[in-house]
Image (cartoon, rainbow, N blue to C red):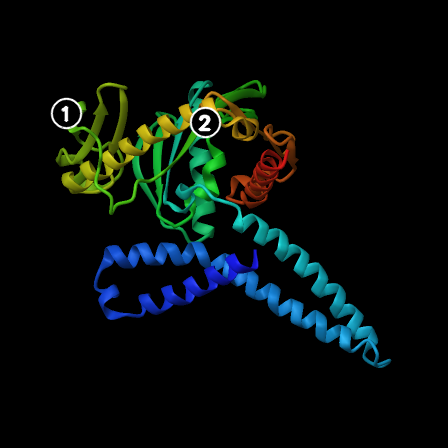
């Protein structure tokens, strides 16, 4: 482990040197690639350096045990250092485990209303707000690429682009069916209804990489955007719909006033959906461990229930219930995401060391 950490520390120093060079700064593609590599290495190197510092603190504190006046403080420092070092060792074990290379990518997050009619669309809107708030709290730029608003509010379907390194890795376990139990605003008798919406999280293809779709298999349609946008968006056919004819997969983009920009983004979303389709098929065939944690990746998999009368959220994959529904719906997803990642790491370790 130590030799690998030393190698990563040396590479991080090299990346810092390269990124300071004017010729690299003048090449956006190279600068982006180096910056992304640095963002992947930095957490590991920083954790290792912190571990080394606490190890030095531990030795210094042990040397003070012989001094009667300093011994009480030394024992406190020894306990604190040992506790932090144990946590850092667990973190390093996770960071050094082979990661999915897509984890570092931007994320495309699709929310779609399911069973439940108008209430399902309202719930889809609530989920979209939850993910938007989570991303905003982390300082991640969010872009609404396409939307199909429902008549009474919420969305029939909406697609977000979360433009931050590591967004896909953080949110990848959100794919699947999300169920809500609550009294709909349209319910006059006060009865609790169960509705559902689905979420699909996909890694965005690298903008520096060319679109690999066979354009002979893609039909491009233009139309007027349906969302907000002022007079311009209502008067021009700037929105773009890309349909992959062999599979029937569709991607739309209406975010920009430029038809060219919307077409490029719609093709990236379509390529991401095709890649996710292939990834799910491989997972169903090859990854028993992955299926045990996050299901097949199919949108029909029920992964989580949001029970409003009881104020709880239950993730069925890891049998975790949190009585913190208001905070979670307001974007406080981190406890759930951390628990899912820990369960995934444990499953990976068990698979590697049967």
Q: Nearer the viewer, mark 2 or mark 1?
A: 2
Residue 148 image label = none
Element on which disc 2 rests: helix
**Looking at this rendering, what residue extends furthest in the front direction?**
3
**Residue drawn at (72%, 64%), measured in percent from left and top?**
80
Instruction: Estimate the spatial distance between the alpha carbons at disc 2 and disc 1, rounded to whole Å.
Output: 28 Å
Q: Is residue 164 left or right of residue 242?
A: right
Q: Determine the image quadrant of residue 153.
A: top left
Q: Is residue 293 above or below residue 45?
A: above
**Residue drawn at (46%, 31%), measured in percent from left and top?**
175
Q: How many numbered tags mark residues here?
A: 2
Residue 283 image label = 2
Residue 99: give x, y in percent of width and height.
47, 44
Q: Is residue 232 above or below residue 66?
A: above
Seen from the viewer's position, the closer of residues 200 and 23 is: 23
* Residue indicated by mark 1: 216
**Looking at this rendering, what residue extends furthest in the left direction?**
236
Seen from the viewer's position, the closer of residues 51 and 10 is: 10
**Residue drawn at (31%, 32%), measured in percent from left and top?**
147
Residue 130: give x, y in percent of width and height.
47, 40
Residue 185: give x, y in percent of width and height.
50, 26
Q: Is residue 229 left or right of residue 313?
A: left
Q: Is residue 247 left or right of residue 101?
A: left
Seen from the viewer's position, the closer of residues 339 and 58 is: 58
Q: Quadrant of the C terminus?
A: top right
Q: Is residue 251 above or below residue 131?
A: above
């Amino acid at each position: 482990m130590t030799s690998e950490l030393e190698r990563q520390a040396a590479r991080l120093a090299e990346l810092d040197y390269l990124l300071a060079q004017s010729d690299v700064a003048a090449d956006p593609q190279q600068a982006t690639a180096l910056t992304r590599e640095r963002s992947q290495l930095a957490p590991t190197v920083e954790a290792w350096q912190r571990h080394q510092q606490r190890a030095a603190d531990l030795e210094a504190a042990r040397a003070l045990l012989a001094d009667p006046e300093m011994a009480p403080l030394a024992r406190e420092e020894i306990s604190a250092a040992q506790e932090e070092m144990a946590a850092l060792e667990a973190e390093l074990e996770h960071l050094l485990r082979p990661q999915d290379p897509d984890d570092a990518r931007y994320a495309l997050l699709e929310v779609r209303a399911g069973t439940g009619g108008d209430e399902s669309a309202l719930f889809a809107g609530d989920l979209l707000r939850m993910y938007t708030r989570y991303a905003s709290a982390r300082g991640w730029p969010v872009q609404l690429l396409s939307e199909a608003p429902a008549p009474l509010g919420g969305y029939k379907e909406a697609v977000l682009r979360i433009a931050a390194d590591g967004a896909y890795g953080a949110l990848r376990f959100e794919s699947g069916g999300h169920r809500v139990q609550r009294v709909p605003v349209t319910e006059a008798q006060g009865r609790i209804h169960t509705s559902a919406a689905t979420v699909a999280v996909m890694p965005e293809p690298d903008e520096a990489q060319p679109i690999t779709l066979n354009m002979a298999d893609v039909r491009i349609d233009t139309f007027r955007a349906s969302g907000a946008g002022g007079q311009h968006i209502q008067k021009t056919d700037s929105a773009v719909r890309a349909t992959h004819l062999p599979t029937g997969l569709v991607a739309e983009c209406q975010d920009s006033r430029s038809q060219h920009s919307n077409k490029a983004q719609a093709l990236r979303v379509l390529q991401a959906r095709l890649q996710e389709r292939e990834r799910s098929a491989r997972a169903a065939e090859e990854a028993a461990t992955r299926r045990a944690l996050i299901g097949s990746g199919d949108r029909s998999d029920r992964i989580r229930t949001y029970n409003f009368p009881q104020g709880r959220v239950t993730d069925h994959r890891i049998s975790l219930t949190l009585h913190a529904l208001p905070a979670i719906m307001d974007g406080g997803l981190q406890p759930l995401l951390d628990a899912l990642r820990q369960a995934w790491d444990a499953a990976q370790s068990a698979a590697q060391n049967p």
